[in-house]
Amino acid sequence: MSTILSGAVACAVGLSLLTGCSSSTPDPAGDAAPAETTQSAPDCTVEKCVALTFDDGPGKFTNKLLDELAQAHAPATFFMVGQNVSKYPDAVKRMVAEGHELGSHTWDHADITKLTKEKIEHEVQWTEQAIEKASGEKPTVLRPPYGSHGVVYDRLIPYPLVLWDVDTLDWKYLNAQKTVETAMKEVKPGSIILMHDIHETSVQAVPDLVSKLTEAGYKLVTVQQLFNDADFEAGKAYMEGPHPAGTSTSGQSTDQEPSDGAQSPTS
């Protein structure tokens, strides 16, 4: 009996020091390095910040993307289609483990401006439930498919709506170099960059893009870190985030839609 008790105490001490005993379930991320979100987030009103965001997954290239982001210590925000989540639950769980932010992209990529109030509620709830089931976490933000939104519809969404000010058009060109060039041409402090993790070429663009952004002095952050709770409210839409004074314009949108992304068949 004393041996059993001693073992239990030893395990308890080990849990408090190491967050788990050796028999715990292995991290699905393997030996991948965690994203930089484990560190204190920068003050994006002082430093140049940018948020990488990925739509339409998870998909067959998402784990490779997570590998690239882990290698670069770069956090990202994933706007996921609910019906895809159950196909790749381990990828969603890994996102949380590696410090990325989870976002909703509706259940089946629906244009919310063409739905009834009840249908919008279903799209939101079903996706939230799927993400929470897969990862243990609820989404914190939502991106309306096609960038299609409006004040009346926005008020029905229980999260901030996150649009974008940099559309890489990665879905159109399917060219890693073009994706990087477009992003670097349009990026500015406070930018939210739109990409898609369902395209292999988009994933291939990430190492070079992250390297160039870092060389240009940008700090990569999640959307929540970009706003840091400053003027970031549920039911309102935002195209870009805070930035150092004099470097950009306000990021909050009202009933406007991004000119390019709104026409995208995959955003």
Image (tube, rainbow, N blue to C red):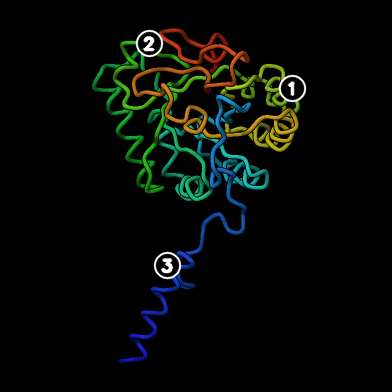
* Image-based side of 153 in relation to 145, left or right: left
CA separation in Å, label 2 and label 1: 31 Å
Provide the residue designation for mark 3.
16
Provide the residue designation for mark 2.
150
* Image-based side of 130 in relation to 36, left or right: left
CA separation in Å, label 3 and label 1: 47 Å
The residue positioned 28% from the left and 28% from the top of the image is 122
- Amino acid type of the residue that numbered disc 3 sits on in the rendered structure: Ser
- Amino acid type of the residue that numbered disc 1 sits on in the rendered structure: Glu
Question: Splitting the image into 4 quarters, where does residue 48 fall?
Answer: top right
- Amino acid type of the residue that numbered disc 2 sits on in the rendered structure: Gly
The residue positioned 43% from the left and 21% from the top of the image is 144
Mark nearest the camera among 3 and 1 is 3
Q: Position of residue 179 (x, y in %)?
A: 69, 25
CA separation in Å, label 2 and label 3: 48 Å
User: Relative to the observer, which residue lies in front, 186 or 181?
Assistant: 186
* Image-based side of 11 in relation to 183, left or right: left
Vertical placement of 163 versus 79: above or below?
Answer: above
Work out which quarter of the rendered image holds the N terminus and state it. Answer: bottom left
Vertical placement of 38 versus 160: above or below?
Answer: below
Question: Splitting the image into 4 quarters, where does residue 218 fall?
Answer: top right
Q: Which mark is residue 224?
A: none
Question: Splitting the image into 4 quarters, where does residue 216 fall?
Answer: top right
Mark earlier in primary sequence (3, 1): 3
Mark earlier in primary sequence (2, 3): 3
Q: Which mark is residue 181?
A: 1
Vertical placement of 59 versus 154: above or below?
Answer: below
Q: Position of residue 94 (x, y in %)?
A: 50, 49
